[in-house]
Image: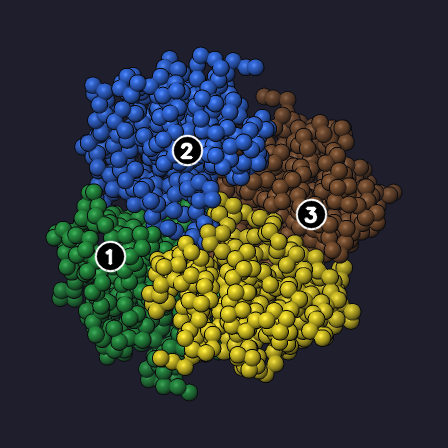
Chain colours: A blue, B green, C yellow, D brown
Amino acid sequence: MTDRRPVVVLGATGTVGQRFVEQLADHPWFEVVAVAASERSAGTRYRDACHWVLPGSPPEDVAAMTVAPLDPVRLASGAIHRPIAFSALPASVALDVEPRFAEAGFPVCSNASAFRTAPDVPLVIPEVNPSHLALIAGQRRTRGWKGFIVTNPNCTVAGTALALKPLDDAFGLRRVFLATLQAVSGAGYPGVPSLDILGNVVPWIPGEETKIEHETALLLGRIEDDVQIPAGVTLSAQVHRVPVVDGHTVCLSLGFDASPTPAEAEAALRGFRGTARVQALPSAPATPILIRDEEDRPQPRFDAAAGAGMSVSVGRIRACPLQDLRLVVLAHNTLRGAAGAAILNAELLVAEGIL
Amino acid sequence: MTDRRPVVVLGATGTVGQRFVEQLADHPWFEVVAVAASERSAGTRYRDACHWVLPGSPPEDVAAMTVAPLDPVRLASGAIHRPIAFSALPASVALDVEPRFAEAGFPVCSNASAFRTAPDVPLVIPEVNPSHLALIAGQRRTRGWKGFIVTNPNCTVAGTALALKPLDDAFGLRRVFLATLQAVSGAGYPGVPSLDILGNVVPWIPGEETKIEHETALLLGRIEDDVQIPAGVTLSAQVHRVPVVDGHTVCLSLGFDASPTPAEAEAALRGFRGTARVQALPSAPATPILIRDEEDRPQPRFDAAAGAGMSVSVGRIRACPLQDLRLVVLAHNTLRGAAGAAILNAELLVAEGIL
Amino acid sequence: MTDRRPVVVLGATGTVGQRFVEQLADHPWFEVVAVAASERSAGTRYRDACHWVLPGSPPEDVAAMTVAPLDPVRLASGAIHRPIAFSALPASVALDVEPRFAEAGFPVCSNASAFRTAPDVPLVIPEVNPSHLALIAGQRRTRGWKGFIVTNPNCTVAGTALALKPLDDAFGLRRVFLATLQAVSGAGYPGVPSLDILGNVVPWIPGEETKIEHETALLLGRIEDDVQIPAGVTLSAQVHRVPVVDGHTVCLSLGFDASPTPAEAEAALRGFRGTARVQALPSAPATPILIRDEEDRPQPRFDAAAGAGMSVSVGRIRACPLQDLRLVVLAHNTLRGAAGAAILNAELLVAEGIL
Amino acid sequence: MTDRRPVVVLGATGTVGQRFVEQLADHPWFEVVAVAASERSAGTRYRDACHWVLPGSPPEDVAAMTVAPLDPVRLASGAIHRPIAFSALPASVALDVEPRFAEAGFPVCSNASAFRTAPDVPLVIPEVNPSHLALIAGQRRTRGWKGFIVTNPNCTVAGTALALKPLDDAFGLRRVFLATLQAVSGAGYPGVPSLDILGNVVPWIPGEETKIEHETALLLGRIEDDVQIPAGVTLSAQVHRVPVVDGHTVCLSLGFDASPTPAEAEAALRGFRGTARVQALPSAPATPILIRDEEDRPQPRFDAAAGAGMSVSVGRIRACPLQDLRLVVLAHNTLRGAAGAAILNAELLVAEGIL
């Protein structure tokens, strides 16, 4: 027995659930005590219930676990404190299941989109808006929950908003045109059929553009009197699926109040760090934003894994004929953009004393 | 012996040169009488000189030809009229070779970028700006050439400018943000190494963004007193290479003088045809712009070959949070975007009586 | 109204069903009068029921048809003669549905595996074993069917057995080691998830090795007294799925009674033609077996479409350190290997006067 | 200053050279003191001379080095002992350069094919035939070298011979049919053009089949009186390039003296370890041969990195209709198959006291 905090993974058999299991395998603070999934998988061994789509095999201890149903009563440990519940559930399932866990006292760190835009649910990137966790108190009070829900953003937003944060702070971001080239792992398993994507581009991902436009404004916004005030920035997103396994590439054109030069923008990005508390978290990368100087980087196959998948790579910072800046942002969509994001949120909750 | 006009292909062994050879194989008006290439290939049979990267094999008659050097004297047929020279030369070679052919009396229909922005050289898409051929007279006069040079645009511009033309005509195009996802065939052979692009995205193509921004304005512009006046539109381009064989995808956000609705824009695109003379050309597609209604089209693997590779497919026409419209344009980069473009230009020259 | 024979496509919405619809669009002898599929699709327009995974769009006339249920009564035209039923059904569905159509008087040309190894059902490649159609009479008699079932082989076997036929005839084939590299279109839609196959190889396809080993021996065998006698050849197959869209590549090592040299084998392959009757069929390629001389061919992207997808390409014919010969065979898996195979069988039935 | 042994990397800018640099970055026994390459690169900083095709960036200390020419005088450290020279040179260059280094006293651990089949040069896999190092003494004596050359096998053979070793020991291997599906990283950089391999298979790699057939027999053979006696096994290899980045897949059919059952073969593979001395080497994997139980493994994207790229994965062990066994072997072609192989050889030389 260790003194690591017990955690459970909801939706553990999917691609993001697998990333949770992989990333938590040797976590210094957390220990997976249960994996849960839909009725179809519940009752079978994790090893058999999941088609593992990460290199190698699932960690032996989790592989041997029997998958539990999505039932908070069954997953509550005997002890006073509920395990942290990491949710990799599909949005439609999360809508029903996550409140039941929060009501039963679980702190839910969710990667699902179901509650990301609920007014009393914090949508948080620790380096960007840790203060939004202040919404939790009101959430518990209003909803009468012993636990609570905290969410992390969409896989594209996770990297993009992080790269935009220091630029917004320094220069006042107002207008963003962006186009994405997104990896197939973002669509889960079986996800994108190979007949759709081999040697091809699909210029559409259901609901993605709206999520990008809305969530980014929330993350760059502020909290006043328990109310989320979105930032005064307007985004226009155009999304594409490309035949890449991991790593979302985003190209952006940015307009600011105080028009920065590329050099000024680069300096702001290079100097960016989260708070000292965030920097000290186990999953926080040494450098949240890495600048690539090469004219042809970042690239998903070479840069997605930077900082153990938690650093965002930025390159091609240059002027734009129509606005202030153009640049390219790349982040690992299932680490910085999903499982790693939720784990970092949980670590922040512990460091802040909320857990 | 046929009464088709003799043509020669310069740079015939490269990927675009191969497309010329393929497309001219059964052309009703033109007949390949010689293929020419650099010293390295000259003197060997075409079959052996070229690594054929199109399906099947090169046409038997051309395969059996001996590759000629890039020498206008050697390639002039005995007859009074010089063959049309289709140029698939690299820009650096074209800069020297194309003027020598024009001087020697060859009409040069060039896909090279060398002279695309020369003030007296027409840059033409037959459906978009056929009147720009009027520059030829001054070009011959000023340069003292018996022949002349006509160019077609960059592979990305060829499809994009065609799709923008009816919108500019109807609504006055002013501002264009665009991001491209470009196929590897655009980079020639050996071109993009597989280690660079398998499962990857490269957010950079040398010189491409400038070409797109500059050539589009020329194509949408006008000629006054033998001077090209670029259109009053500003573009911001961000380019990417993706693991696709043929077909460049471009997503755009557009701002106009007269803000059209998506429905108005779609109507303008659907109704677009070239002049009656252009519509009657052998390589002109029945419908230059095809509208795709599906939410996830156009896609390169399914739409690049539309209209024998000469139709441009447009989809996802919708509002933009920051400007008037967003849409996706797709065209075949080595047909509409290269060999097919030059052949269509040559056909127009014939139909206009210039040849 | 034409005087083409009416045909119906069973399982019309899947990937092979789509190939039937595409290939039959301008067929000189056949006309699609109905498309049928499972209950889930029946009642909706074909355009909406099927996710079209071929270039462009489905033919307009079929796109506008309402999908019928898999019911022979509903699909029987009023006329005396039943339409030919092309079956692209999954094996488990075909097992039940195809006999009901045969009983109701439909000639069923099936691509499904359900009846391929039934002793009274012909498994036919027109160039290889047209005489096996003689089983039909017994089949109808024994089963009491007004119609009948004829099958074509598995997508890998279709090309491989065709290439082996002239070698077996000339030299007596005894032992075959083969390894396949198979395209994803062979697995239908959604079929192979992109997360499984992007940048990857899967060394397993359920049931495929057994089908290859068994069906090839049947095709090279003979009929005696209404009984199929498999050829005296033993095969060992090892299969792989690779990230290719269309075209199965197969490498083989062959052992014969009369050890041929590579040159003798090549001569036998080059000289091979089907019977005069088969050669005259509309879908029969001019040359069923194409020899590629290049040391690096055949390749799926360049050779799968040869002969409109109905020619088999053979290359790298060379000695083997352990047996007589090594060579590489490539065929289009959804044309020669599926829809085209069934259509060619139907054409043979017409030419033979059986229909 | 550390007390790690100094090493130099010859051909350091290529893809295998980069793997040496990456793998030696934190090596416990070795320290890169110089990188050398052809005249074209010599004199520039490593960072600028090499197009890094591995994730991230080259290690900072090596990135800052100036690339040296391939000159043993310049690369000899002042000390008495020469650095170990790891050679990632092309074969044609190695043929000339490696003897000059050996003559000058360098122990050369070469990945090049130039001397692999020289009768007095050991071709070694530490787990397979460590005793072949005994050839070194004679090599130095005969050639009058102060140093020597040791080689590791071809990237395909490295994994295959390792998997065959325990089966040969236990059952007497006689006949091997094999087909490969090889990754593009095996062809260096720029290597395979993307136009050749995207969505395609190339059934040919120059010289590869002969190397596989010959080197495997040498590795399984023995040394008698300073003479290499190849094993009494005959191989037939058929090779293919596939669109995979790293990891060669090989399917095999095996014939033995003592026909093993699949279970017996699996037991022999599972129990296999190198000598205790080899097992203790820093780069030796805990388990040289990993058995995959799943019916669809091993796969390159999921298994190539097993054991830090030094374990070989074996799966689908089953009977063969024509011989004793069929199975699939997968190994990382630039780690176990190249740089890692040479480093493991160098470690063995140290452990054996030869260095």
**Mark sitting on residue A89:** 2
Q: Are marks 2 and 1 on the same chain?
A: no
Q: Which chain is disc 2 placed on?
A: A
Mark toward the viewer: 2 or 1: 2
Residue D312 placement, left or right of A152: right
> Horizontally, is C143 left or right of D106 in the view?
left
Residue designated by label 1: B216
Q: Residue at x 71, y 47 (%)?
A: D318
Q: Secondary structure at mark 1?
A: helix
Tell me: residue A238, above or below residue B103.
above
Measured from the top left, where is residue C62 in percent x and y? 37, 67
The amino acid beneath tag 3 is Leu
Q: Residue at x 67, y 75 (%)?
A: C267
Above or below residue A122? Residue B304 is: below
Q: Label 3's element?
A: strand
Q: Give the residue at mark 3.
A: D327
Q: Is residue B89 visible?
A: no
Q: Nearer the viewer, residue B312 or B338?
A: B312
Q: Which mark is residue B89?
A: none
Chain where mark 1 sits: B
> Is any part of residue A219 visible from this angle?
yes
Chain containing mark 3? D
Q: x%, y% of residue B12?
A: 43, 68
Residue B335: image location, x then y, percent: 36, 65
Q: Residue at x 39, y 86 (%)?
A: B2
Does label 3 lie on the same chain as label 1?
no
Between marks 2 and 3, how big is the CA–CA gap? 38 Å
Q: Residue visible at 71% across and 67% down?
A: C230
Instruction: Assess whether mark 3 and mark 1 are in contact (beta carbons under 8 angstroms).
Output: no
Q: Amino acid at mark 1?
A: Thr
